[in-house]
Amino acid sequence: MDNIKLSLVLSSGILLASKPESADDTQQILASGLISAIITYAKEVHHEELQSISYHDRTISFVQFQEFIFIVETLDEEFTFTERQSKQLLEQIKLSAFSLLDGRDPELISEGEAQLILEHCFHDISSLNIILTRHPLKNLIPEIFTIQHKVKGVEILGNKTDSVYHKSIAQIIDNNILKVNQEIKVHSFLKLIPEHKKTFYVIFSTDSFTTKVGYFIIPQELDYTFFRIYPVLERLIKSYTGSRQNFDFIDLLVELQEFEDSGNKFSMIDIEEISLATLSNVTKNNLDIVLFAALSGNPIHVVGDKSVAKLIVDTLSIFTQHLSFNVVDWITEEDLSKVDFNILIRGIVGMSSNTHQSILPLIHNKETITVIDLEEDKITGPSTSSYFIQFIEKIRNEEPTKASVIIFQELKKLVSLAYIITSTVMKVREDSQTLLKELSTQFPYPSSFIEKSLNLAKQRNNLLE
């Protein structure tokens, strides 16, 4: 989020903190006081809630929460928010502020605490799918080393610094080397290592005796981004290595650094054309089946009228904000020869009944697909999840921007638990199973929620059993 500046100000105009900190404190204090005065004037004289001020070629947005004002401005003249981005960003700040500032006495907020509050808000808004870090690996420098596997333990070669991170990653790979499919040239996994309080994106190539390893340390503000794009990076690795008889490991890491994140379906849809109320009405008592598939990244076919199918597909994309998931409003039989078949087995797709009948004979494991048949008023699918049902009933009539941000807050819980589960790979099998049982009792979630997190964790770390 290098392009954004976030400030926390009292409604009286007193500046509490800015991130990044301003080089000219006097100018920042004057600007904060002026904005506070304008907001107060608009509210008291014109009875309006202002959300932005435009001047020259720049727009400053702000949101008021009780006695506090958050000010958001862009630092790059070429970087601007769309109306949708601005709305969702401000809505996210409201939600973040509620948990941090609700009922707080403004006089008791110290400068240090104000900085921590801004860091928390920065993390929340940076993880929103609408604000993309176009090249998330660009500025991350990979660490590279080689493991020599021995009868007892490992030797790390070419590691002059003897990094503690190298040891942890080498031990993970060595402990799980027998699980590795030797026919695949390059493997990768995304993993939280709790003792280091860091997330690692690891790429390795092995012959069981020697393993080349490269890894990136993921900044905290990008952990949800990497969770979402991991399957896309996996496909990039397979494409890169599959098209070459021999490949250079260093070149592969450079290729990954050039990866451009184009977002997912939700970042591109018109948010005003989605409806949670319609989704609830159409799915009725089977919404739990549909939600399990959407949240887990499992395939969904929406079959029936084109306009209704498009509305359902777009609305379901709200529940895939944590995924880079194939979402296609509508395909026809003519499209089948041109469309990537992976979309049909790993995505949410709208289609007619005739198209669906043409597709089914081509798909193995049909039982994994959730089908919303609008014509037959029937829904079938392999799994259910009740966690989001009551939650959706509470927000089904909320304004779409607010609803999407509230849902994203719940999705972050799912992702956080999945990250925690990735840490079990360092354990022996018995310890891993014990840890998972402990998770089911320690977290206030139903078993289906934990099951979804486990599925998502396995998709990002194939060393998990």
Image (cartoon, rainbow, N blue to C red):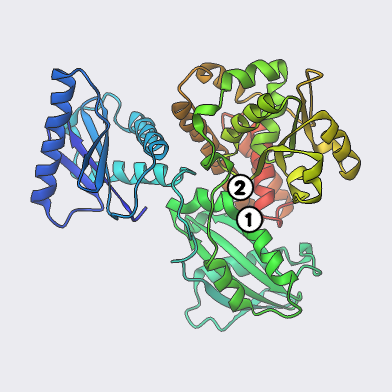
The amino acid pointed to by label 2 is Ser
Q: Is residue 210 above or below residue 430?
A: below
Q: Residue at x 26, y 43 (%)?
A: 59
Name the N-terminal-most of marks 2 and 1: 1
Pick whichever, 393 or 309, lies toward us.
Answer: 309
Q: Is residue 212 above or below residue 136?
A: below
- Would you identify the image quadrant in which residue 23 lies? bottom left
Evaluate whether residue 16 shows in this view: yes
* Left or right of 1 in this view: 299: right
Q: Residue at x 69, y 24 (%)?
A: 288
**Residue at mark 1:** 232
Badge 2 element: loop
Q: Residues within 10 Å of mark 1 (few under 14, many from 20)?
A: some
Marks 2/1: CA distance?
A: 7 Å
Q: Residue at x 13, y 25 (%)?
A: 41
* Left or right of 426 in this view: 286: right
- Residue 109 locus on image (x, y percent): 20, 36
- Residue 227 locus on image (x, y percent): 57, 50
- Would you identify the image quadrant in which residue 139 lies? bottom left
Pick whichever, 280 or 307, lies toward us.
Answer: 307
Q: How many marks?
A: 2
Evaluate whether residue 446 shows in this view: no
* Left or right of 78 in this view: 85: right
The amino acid pointed to by label 1 is Val
Image marks 2 and 1: residues in contact by CB distance under 8 Å: yes
Label disc, if present, on residue 277 of the rendered structure: none
Label disc, if present, on residue 324 of the rendered structure: 2
Q: Residue at x 44, y 27 (%)?
A: 402
Q: Is residue 396 above or below residue 457?
A: above
Badge 1 element: helix
